[in-house]
């Protein structure tokens, strides 16, 4: 069951998952039927059995002014983890890169840029983006600054989330998931395809929110 402090957040917007399902259904509707009724994110999320249990870990997401604007919760599943994200405010409209990073330290005034202390993507396997263990689906910000996302993750374990001293980072730009075809040429090297930076980050831009992942209730 959704925890009460998140109920009002979920009622303010539509779940991306709900939107996708309903959008597909609408595509099969007769031409004269203009739209399908919306389904609130709370309804979609509460239907998932894992979310009827307590989360194993969570992160309070703060902005560069150190104000909490959202929360990410992780629930254990048989084959991995279910991630539930809710932001009441503070997310610019559009898609944003959204990842688990390797260091649980969120310093908005870090010398190398906001939240640079969280390090790079959590990537114990040494792979390229978008195959990092910390890669997650993009977060979509709505016009009122809210954002909601529920996703299953199977590249990261409950143990890593609870004991790994990790962080969740929200970026200011969209994530290209290093999907750069060879017809695009790197300006600096003249080589085709994604450069080293893109392979590490997905070119999602600066970091606008950060949350240290802690065991639930800690």
Image: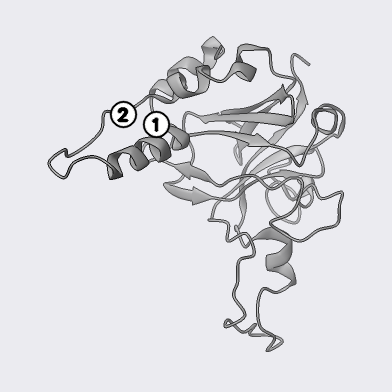
Residue picked out by circle 2: 38
Lateral position of residue 185 relative to residue 134, left or right: left
Element under disc 2: loop
The mark lying in front, picked from 1 and 2, is 2
Residue positioned 77% across, 25% down in the render: 214
The vertical placement of 186 against 102, above or below, is below
Which residue is depicted at the point 18% across and 41% down? 30
- Identified at 79% across, 50% down, the residue is 119
Q: Which mark is residue 141?
A: none
**Height in image: 151 above or below 135?**
above
Local crowd at mark 1 within 10 Å, few (<14), some, or many (≥20)?
many
Measured along the vertical axis of the image, is residue 207 above or below residue 199?
above
In the rendered view, would you say 97 is above or below 85? Answer: below
Pointer 2 local density, CA inside 10 Å: few below 14, some 14–19, many at least 20: few
Q: How is the image coloured?
A: one colour
The answer to whether residue 169 is seen in the rendering is yes
Could you say which quadrant of the image residue 76 lies in?
top right
The residue beneath circle 1 is 14
Residue 174, position as x, y percentages in the image = 53, 56
Quadrant occupied by the N terminus: top right
Say whether marks 1 and 2 touch (CB < 8 Å): yes
In this rendering, does residue 143 appear at all?
Answer: no
Q: Secondary structure at mark 1?
A: loop
> Who's the residue at 45% across and 37% down the image?
16
Q: On the image, which quarter does residue 177 sit in?
A: bottom right
Q: Position of residue 65 (x, y in %)?
A: 59, 37
Q: Is residue 180 left or right of residue 164?
A: left
């Amino acid at each position: 069951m959704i925890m009460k402090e998140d109920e009002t957040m979920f009622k303010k917007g539509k779940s991306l998952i709900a939107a996708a399902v309903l959008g597909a259904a609408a595509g099969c509707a007769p031409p004269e039927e203009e739209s399908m009724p919306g389904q609130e994110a709370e309804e979609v999320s509460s239907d998932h059995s894992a979310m009827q249990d307590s989360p194993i870990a969570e992160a309070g997401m703060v902005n560069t002014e150190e104000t909490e604007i959202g929360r990410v919760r992780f629930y254990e599943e048989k084959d991995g983890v279910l991630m539930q994200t809710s932001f009441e405010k503070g997310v610019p409209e559009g898609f944003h890169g959204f990842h688990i990073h390797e260091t649980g330290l969120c310093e908005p005034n870090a010398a190398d840029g906001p939240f640079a202390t969280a390090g790079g993507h959590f990537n114990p396997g040494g792979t390229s983006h978008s195959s990092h263990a910390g890669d997650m689906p993009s977060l979509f910000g709505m016009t009122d600054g809210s954002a909601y996302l529920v996703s299953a993750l199977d590249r990261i374990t409950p143990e890593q989330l609870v004991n790994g001293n990790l962080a969740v980072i929200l970026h200011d730009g969209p994530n290209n998931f290093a999907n750069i075809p060879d017809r695009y040429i790197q300006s600096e090297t003249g080589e085709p395809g994604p450069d080293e930076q893109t392979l590490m980050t997905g070119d999602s831009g600066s970091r606008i929110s950060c949350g240290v992942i802690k065991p639930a209730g800690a």
